[in-house]
């Protein structure tokens, strides 16, 4: 810039551009100030100064503007245009998360009365239990609200006082303050066979016996991070539900949360859908979310993640399990387009979150015969324990190709079953926020992957674009994934986009297709 006067004349839209660019990237003033401090602590603006800049009450010095430009990976002169580009400074309004819904048409077939009749019949015919269906409802609710539950966050903060980390003694003191007693029991993992014939292990880690006794498996004494989580969940039941007599059971293994029957055994899940199934499942979810918010309070944990570029190893700093840390990332990050999988081989999901609407390669309740083997959670199944891996994936979602980035980690659960944790994001919205067209980038990467049999290094120009986005998002494993081959994946092997495909694409002719061909032939002959 030639002189200060010229600089001032070109700053009319500067505050507006910074504010709307910040909002397009889902950052608060505190987030942006923190990012600036990380980039250059000497020239970084304070929160109050940033606020005045955005309101047009102050014009930042060149050094300060250079720091802001570096955070957003923009050329400094972009902020000084005399005529603003409307698309560049207009924030994108947030929308509900999760996978796209379906139109309930024709309306007369989707009335409450008809659905109340049809849903139980559907569950009965598909073998879906009422508890499983309740979890689907809750997951849809969770994804629709993008993991934003301020009432649960506040309840946890009132108990934990936003302390980070909370050590085990702190958790014991909280339990004692609430009048809870802790007793220990001994149960070793027991083998069981699921509907696929696969043998795995299952064990109870803790349960709440009304009115005020928490029973904890002695094995947790040697696993204090898991012990903290179990105790936090049971504390959640007491805080949120007032010891109302419901028995909460924490079960490790390939199973949903359950409750004890009158004999102290894990209750059999009913194929019937009833209000109690819904209530129990919802309360389990609330208490699980409460536990995460207690152990990783929103603002302190978000600041810690920002300081450590959202690395999974941050879990060690706050003394929680990797699963708790990864799930909390999806709730506290300013970037809303996350997914999280907790996957057990050969294709069972124990936990799912899809704030970005990513399709599932398999289901929560049933294994599928042709899952795509190139999803990170499948490829990680063959890796050693506690080894993580970053990956860039290309996936068709409807009529649009998306670029996803994820970090996966292979671990063991409390019952000693191996499983894979995966946290990931949809990069398309972040690319679009930078004024690029993600569909163009995705098409180039997809073509390169197809040409090379399904995986390919990223072209240099696209690698540079994604590296810029990774820096803005401040997520370290996105950058690591960029340095590896991108993988072309699909939601089902029958739609494999690779050449040659991973599965044979032959199928029996649909009787409906035969009828259509017959009708078309009649019309053509007449």
Image (cartoon, rainbow, N blue to C red):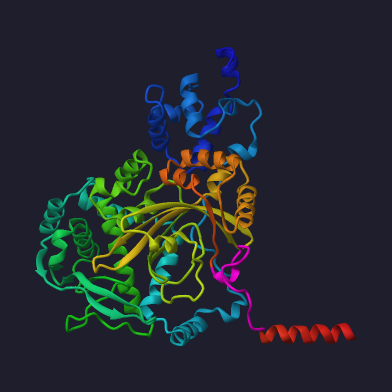
Disc tally is 0
**Magenta stretch: residue 505 in it?**
yes
- In the figure, is residue 448 to the left or right of 369? right
Tell me if residue 295 comes above or below residue 197 in the rendering: above
Q: Which stretch is magenta?
A: 492-509
Can see residue 350?
A: no
Q: Position of residue 294 (x, y in %)?
A: 25, 53
Residue 276 visible, this orientation:
yes
Q: Nearer the viewer, residue 517 or 214?
A: 517
Q: Is residue 212 magenta?
A: no
Q: Is residue 426 left or right of residue 349?
A: right
Residue 76 lies left or right of residue 224; in this view the side is right
- Residue lying at the far right of the rendered structure: 526
Quadrant in which the N terminus is drawn: top right
| Residue 241 or residue 314, whichever sits in front | 314
Residue 271: name its quadrant: bottom left
Question: In this picture, is 454 found above or below 284?
Answer: above
Q: Which residue is rendered at x = 25% and y = 74% of the image? A: 202
Out of 126 and 349, give the one closest to the viewer.
Answer: 349
Picture quadrant of residue 187 = bottom left
Majority SS type along the magenta span: loop
Q: Where is residue 491 drawn, in percent x and y? A: 53, 66
Residue 140 x %, y %: 45, 66
């Amino acid at each position: 810039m030639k002189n200060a006067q010229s600089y001032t004349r070109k700053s009319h839209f500067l505050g507006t551009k910074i504010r709307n660019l910040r909002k397009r990237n889902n950052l608060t003033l505190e987030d942006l100030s923190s990012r600036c401090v990380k980039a250059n602590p000497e020239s970084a603006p304070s929160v109050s100064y940033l606020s005045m800049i955005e309101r047009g009450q102050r014009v930042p010095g060149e050094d300060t503007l250079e720091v802001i430009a570096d955070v957003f990976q923009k050329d400094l002169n972009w902020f000084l245009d005399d005529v603003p580009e409307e698309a560049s400074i207009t924030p994108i309004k947030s929308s509900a998360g999760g996978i796209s819904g379906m139109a309930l048409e024709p309306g007369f077939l989707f009335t409450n009365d008809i659905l109340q009749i049809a849903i139980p019949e559907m569950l009965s015919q598909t073998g879906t239990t009422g508890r499983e269906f309740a979890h689907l409802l809750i997951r849809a609710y969770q994804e629709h609200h993008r993991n934003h539950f301020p009432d649960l966050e506040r309840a946890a903060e009132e108990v934990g006082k936003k302390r980070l980390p909370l050590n085990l003694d702190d958790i014991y003191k909280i339990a004692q303050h609430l009048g809870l007693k802790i007793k220990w029991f001994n149960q070793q993992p027991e083998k069981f066979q699921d509907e696929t014939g696969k043998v795995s292990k299952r064990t109870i880690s803790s349960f709440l016996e009304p009115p005020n006794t928490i029973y904890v498996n002695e094995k947790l004494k040697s696993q204090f991070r898991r012990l903290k989580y179990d105790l936090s969940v049971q504390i959640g039941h007491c805080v949120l539900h007032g010891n109302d007599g419901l028995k909460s059971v924490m079960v490790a293994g390939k199973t949903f949360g359950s409750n004890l029957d009158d004999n102290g055994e894990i209750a059999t899940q009913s194929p019937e859908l009833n209000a109690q199934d819904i209530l129990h499942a919802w309360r389990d979810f609330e208490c699980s979310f409460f536990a995460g918010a207690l152990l990783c309070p929103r603002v302190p944990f978000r600041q810690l993640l920002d300081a450590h570029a959202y690395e999974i190893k941050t879990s060690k700093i706050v003394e929680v399990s990797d699963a708790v840390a990864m799930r909390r990332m999806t709730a506290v990050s300013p970037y809303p387009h996350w997914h999280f999988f907790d996957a057990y081989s050969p294709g069972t999901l124990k936990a799912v979150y899809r704030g970005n609407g990513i399709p599932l390669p398999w289901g929560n309740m049933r294994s599928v015969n042709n899952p795509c083997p190139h999803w990170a959670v499948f490829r990680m199944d063959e890796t050693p324990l506690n080894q993580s891996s970053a990956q860039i994936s290309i996936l068709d979602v409807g009529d649009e190709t998306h670029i996803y980035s994820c970090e996966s980690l292979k671990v063991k659960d409390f019952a000693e079953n191996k499983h894979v944790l995966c946290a990931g994001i949809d990069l398309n919205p972040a690319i679009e926020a930078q004024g690029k067209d993600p569909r163009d980038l995705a098409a180039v990467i997809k073509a390169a992957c197809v040409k090379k049999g399904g995986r390919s290094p990223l072209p240099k120009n696209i690698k540079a674009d994604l590296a810029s986005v990774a820096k803005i998002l401040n997520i370290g494993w996105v950058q690591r994934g960029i340095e590896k081959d991108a993988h072309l994946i699909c939601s089902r092997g029958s739609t494999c986009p690779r050449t040659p495909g991973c599965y044979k694409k032959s199928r029996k002719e649909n009787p409906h297709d035969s009828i259509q061909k017959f009708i078309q032939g009649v019309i053509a002959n007449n």
